[in-house]
Image (cartoon, rainbow, N blue to C red):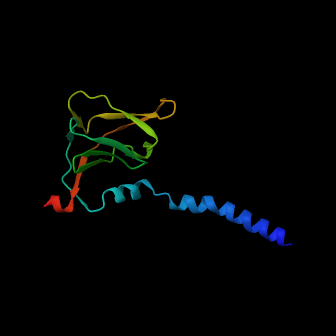
Amino acid sequence: MKRIVFALATAAALLSAPAVQAGTRLSGEEKLAKLLEGRVAGEPVNCINTYNTRSARIIDKTAIVYEQGSTIYVNRTTNPRTLDDGDVMVTKLHSSRLCNVDTVHLRDQSHFMPSGFVGLDTFVPYRKATQAH
């Protein structure tokens, strides 16, 4: 009898573990909010220079984030639900600026097969609250 109770308790613990882990995974909006903590949004701009962009990354089903020095630019794209943080972004540039009329093609990271594309929207700059004034 003790073995059955122990087996049931162990099985219940193992089955509940994925549910607990899944509950702690942040949504794209939550990840973006955490990234922007302590920052203030500025006026949206249509284009950003690419030469001083340190990094660009996808926030799952939410936005593309471009970092330039201490400023973070958030682009919510025309179809954010297709954004997958496991994809690779491929952008064809026609100048040294990335603008809201450009598109970003998405490729699967493991096989580099096309997985979609998004059109860019305006870029909202976020600066640390002390720098925003």
Assign the N terminus to one quadrant of the image: bottom right
Q: Position of residue 59 (x, y in %)?
A: 39, 48
**Is residue 75 positioned above or below 42 on the image?**
above
Give the residue drawn at x 36%, y 43%. Answer: 57
**Is residue 96 positioned above or below 38 on the image?**
above
- Position of residue 21 in the picture relative to residue 55 (left or right): right
Q: Residue furthest left?
A: 133
**Is residue 14 positioned above or below 105 on the image?**
below
- Position of residue 44 in the picture relative to residue 59 (left or right): left
Q: Position of residue 63 (x, y in %)?
A: 36, 47
Q: Residue furthest right?
A: 1
Give the residue drawn at x 24%, y 37%. Answer: 99
Query: 112 or 44: nearer the eye?
Result: 112
- Residue 17 lies in what quarter of the image? bottom right
Give the residue drawn at x 28%, y 34%. Answer: 102
Query: Total marks drawn?
Result: 0
Q: Position of residue 67 (x, y in %)?
A: 27, 46
Q: Position of residue 51 (x, y in %)?
A: 21, 35
- Residue 94 lies in what quarter of the image? top left
- Position of residue 9 in the picture relative to residue 40 (left or right): right
Assign the C terminus to one quadrant of the image: bottom left
